[in-house]
Image (cartoon, helix red, strand yellow):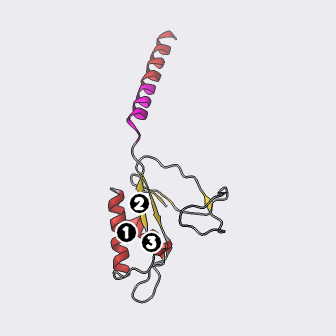
Amino acid sequence: MKKNNQAGSWLEEMPDRQARKISGLPVGLIPGTEYLQTVVALSPSDMVVLYTDGITEAENANGQDLGREQFLEWARLAPVNSPEATGEALLKRLEAFRDNVRQDDETLLVLQREHEPLAVMLGEVAGSYAVGQLRKALRRNS
């Protein structure tokens, strides 16, 4: 799932009709199983939350699974000021849900794209300055 911390928009995992079958085996996955690959463009400050089935299959004291929908709801409500804050909030809720009992491979990874590199920003500024100068020259000549 992708979360934009400025606009609050979400891109949730969905079957992609244009997803491609890939060859080779990603680390830790099962041979003979088909996997799909999807490309997602991240804007500066976008976050990506990756998790294993150990998170969504975690059980509480009553034997009830957490489930994907509940985990996604927690992620929607999590703070977005940093990947650390998002991850810590999700893990805190998970620990409370399962009464601090670990049952499976609970792996959670929260990543955030950095802001635009300075060179790109300077290039955009220089480009907009050049366009502005060109417009001024065209107005003077017309």
Estimate the spatial distance between the alpha carbons at disc 3 and disc 2, rounded to whole Å.
14 Å
Viewer-proximal residue, 63 or 76? 63
Q: Which residue is mark 2?
A: 110
Name the residue tied to disc 1. Answer: 90
Label 2: element kind: strand
Decide: marks 3, 1 in contact (CB < 8 A)? yes
Seen from the viewer's position, the closer of residues 96 and 10 is 96
* Residue drawn at x 57%, y 52% as measured from the top left: 39
Q: Which residue is mark 3?
A: 71
Q: CA distance from mark 1 to mark 2?
A: 10 Å
The number of numbered badges drawn on the structure is 3
Instruction: Determine which of the numbered discs, if any, sits on residue 40 in the image.
Output: none
Q: Position of residue 33 (x, y in %)?
A: 65, 68
Residue 27: horizontal and vertical position, in percent? 54, 62
Q: Earlier in the sequence, mark 1 or mark 2?
A: 1
Q: Which residues are magenta?
A: 116-128
15 w.r.t. 129: above or below: below
